[in-house]
Amino acid sequence: MKIIKILGLIILSIIVFILSSVLVIKVLGYRTNIANGITGTEIKQIEIGMPFEEIISILGKPFTIENRNGQHSIVHCKNPKLLEMSVNKNTDIIQVVDSFFNGTYCCDAYKESIQKGVTLQYTKRHCFFRNLFSNFPMLWVHLDSSYCVHSVYAREFDLDLKPVIYSLSKKIDYDTWEEIPNEISLYINDELLEKYFKSKK
């Protein structure tokens, strides 16, 4: 009988812990995983071709930067060279990216396929436990070789990919898969943008 009571208390404690955690997640919301408390208003200010300095003045510095263009399989290269690093207030992003692309290549195949550019990631994934109880947003700003905005993309995540929140890019001619000059493609899910990136009033 005593063992049953103990097991009951343990189970009850686990249930209380889970419910409390869910409540904390709902109360705190998603803001801790969004760099600089970025809002939908600020995201909408970013334009195609906008220079790096202006992006940073609006959104601040990202959590991480990365470049996976030119990545190829282990069949072609056993040690592909990729850029992926965390950013702090002292990080000179342009210097880091320039150094990466000016450095030695992992192999000739990679050197031929590499595309200079960098992605600024302004959100980060929640821990696995939080993923079980809430979705969260991911936001990327992709820069071209001149460190100007190539595209902006935000998507809702949980354990799987979810709906697009925001997408800004040049229009693509799907017959040639080339960008159409001076034509912009814009998609906004206003409900999700407001949910995750609450706009300033």
Image (cartoon, rainbow, N blue to C red):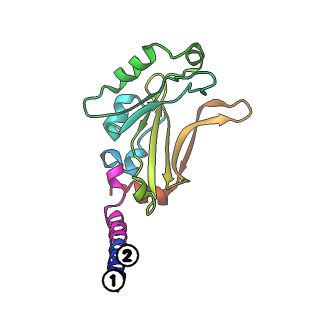
Q: How busy is the neighbourhood of tag 1: few (under 14 within 10 Å), some, or many (20 plus)? A: few
Q: Earlier in the sequence, mark 2 or mark 1?
A: 1
The residue type indicated by label 1 comes to Lys
Q: Quadrant of residue 13?
A: bottom left
Give the percent coordinates (x, y) of residue 34.
Answer: 36, 48
Q: How busy is the neighbourhood of tag 2: few (under 14 within 10 Å), some, or many (20 plus)? A: few
* Residue at the spot 37% in from the left edge and 75% down from the top edge: 11
Q: Considering the image in quadrants, where does the N terminus appear?
A: bottom left
SS at mark 1 in the image: helix
Residue under label 1: 5
Name the side, left or right, on which 135 lies relative to 8: right
Q: Quadrant of residue 64?
A: top left
Q: Considering the image in quadrants, where does the C terminus appear?
A: bottom left
The residue type indicated by label 2 comes to Ile
Q: Where 116 sits versus 22, above or below?
A: above
**Residue 190 lies in the magenta stretch:** no
Closer to the camera: disc 2 or disc 1?
Answer: 1
Q: Main secondary structure of the magenta part?
A: helix
Give the percent coordinates (x, y) of residue 106.
Answer: 51, 17
**Residue at far right of view:** 175
Q: Specify start and end residues of the magenta stretch as a single range.
A: 17-33
The disc label shown at residue 11, or none: 2
* Residue at the spot 32% in from the left edge and 49% down from the top edge: 37
**Residue 32 lies in the magenta stretch:** yes
Question: What number of labels is visible?
Answer: 2
* Residue at the spot 33% in from the left edge and 45% down from the top edge: 35
Give the percent coordinates (x, y) of residue 86.
Answer: 35, 34
Disc 2/disc 1 C-alpha distance (Å): 10 Å
